[in-house]
Amino acid sequence: MNPSNASSSNPNGSNRRDDDSDDDLRERLMIANFFILDGRRRRHRRRLRMWPVGLSGADYIQQVLNNPNPTNCRWQFRVGPSVFQLLADTLLEEGRYQPTSGVTVEEALGMFMKVIGFGTTQRDLADRFCRSLQTVWSCVHKIWTQC
């Protein structure tokens, strides 16, 4: 064994193992960094629609209320169409609910009835009625405080 080699590294080659483990760690960090950055790029590149294509909230309410089978309204809102319309008219006539931000009183009442009747979450209502979480909260809160 050459004495000059013995002084620069351990006889068991531990310096070489340290270099290999450092290189392995660097490689793993680079791969992890690539996946993190790639995920960010993909998220910014592909914006999906927030709401599925389908009926808007007002159209959904009208379809349920005007369905020839009144059972559908009872299944959706726990009341028949005539009671639902009577509640909506009462809220409007007594000035307890003022339609705002393009939300009709029927739509707001439908959101409220789904929360009360089924415990539907705000996210589910936002999906069903194609509204923001803030709008859903505002509509349900207005009906709740006025009843």
Image (cartoon, helix red, strand yellow):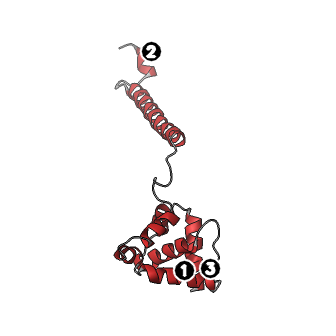
Distance (Cα) linking label 2 and label 1? 95 Å
Residue 58: give x, y in percent of width and height: 52, 66
The residue that appears at 49% across and 39% down in the rendered structure is 42
Residue under pointer 2: 4
Locate residue 103: give its quadrant: bottom right
Amino acid bearing label 3: Tyr
Residue under pointer 1: 88
Q: Earlier in the sequence, mark 3 or mark 1?
A: 1
The crowd level at tag 3 (other Cα within 10 Å; few <14, some 14-19, many 20+) is many
Locate residue 94: give its quadrant: bottom right
Q: Nearer the viewer, mark 3 or mark 1?
A: 1
Q: Nearer the viewer, mark 2 or mark 1?
A: 1
Residue under pointer 3: 97
Q: Which mark is residue 9?
A: none
Residue 32: give x, y in percent of width and height: 45, 38
SS label for mark 2: helix
- The answer to whether residue 130 is left or right of residue 10 is right
Label tally: 3
The crowd level at tag 1 (other Cα within 10 Å; few <14, some 14-19, many 20+) is many
The crowd level at tag 2 (other Cα within 10 Å; few <14, some 14-19, many 20+) is few
Residue 78: give x, y in percent of width and height: 40, 80
Q: Earlier in the sequence, mark 2 or mark 1?
A: 2
Q: Nearer the viewer, residue 60 or 136?
A: 60
- The answer to whether residue 68 is left or right of residue 126 is left
The residue that appears at 58% across and 83% down in the rendered structure is 91
Task: Name the outermost residue toward the top.
Answer: 2
Q: Nearer the viewer, residue 35 or 112?
A: 112
Amino acid bearing label 1: Ala
Look at the picture and state if 110 lies above or below 16: below
Look at the picture and state if 23 lies above or below 84: above
SS label for mark 1: helix
